[in-house]
Image: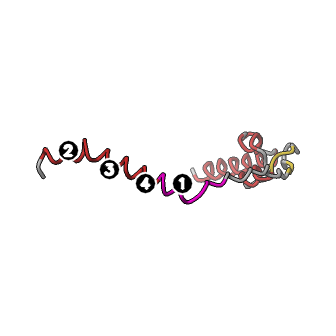
Amino acid sequence: MNPLLFLYLNLVRGPQIAAERQRKEAEAAQAAGPVPAPAPVKPKEVVLASCKKCDKQVDEAELRANFDSLCVACASDPMSMLSPVFIFQILLILFALAVFVYRSL
C-alpha cells in the first residue's frame, strides 16, 4: 500500500469514520428508546452459623469456604488445629520410628 495513502487512512479518515460510527450508534440507541434504570439492589439476607472451635457467629458462606466449619481466624491458625490427642499420636509415631531405627542398626 502506498505510504501516503496509509497515513491518510490512519490519521485523517480513520478518526472521521470512528466519529461517524459513534454518532450513528448514539442515534440508534436514542431511537430505540430510553434506557431503563437499573433495578435497585436488594440487600442479601445473611445466614449466620457458628464456628466449631470458638462458637463465634459468622456468615455461613465463610464457613463453607473453609470446608471445616471454622471461621477465618481459627482456620488460619495452624497451631489451633493441634489437639493433645494429635500431638500424642505424632509422638508415638516418632518413638516407633526411633525404636525401628535403633533395632535395625
SS for dot 3: helix
Secondary structure mostly seen in magenta is: helix
The residue nearer to you, when weighing 91 against 72, is 72
Q: Residue at x 68, y 52 (%)?
A: 38
Q: How far is mark 3 from mark 1, CA to CA?
A: 20 Å
Which residue type does callout 1 highlight? Gln
Which residue type does callout 2 highlight? Tyr
SS for dot 2: helix
Q: How far is mark 2 from mark 4, CA to CA?
A: 23 Å
- Residue 32 place in picture, x, y as percent: 55, 60
Q: Which mark is residue 30?
A: 1
Q: Residues within 10 Å of mark 3 (few under 14, many from 20)?
A: few
- Residue 51 is a magenta residue: no
Q: Is residue 55 left or right of residue 6?
A: right
Which residue is labeled 3 in the image? 17
SS for dot 1: helix
Q: Which residues are magenta?
A: 26-36
Labelled pair 2, 4 in contact (Cβ < 8 Å): no
Which residue is labeled 2 in the image? 8
Question: Along the polypeptide, which appears first: circle 2 or circle 4?
Answer: 2
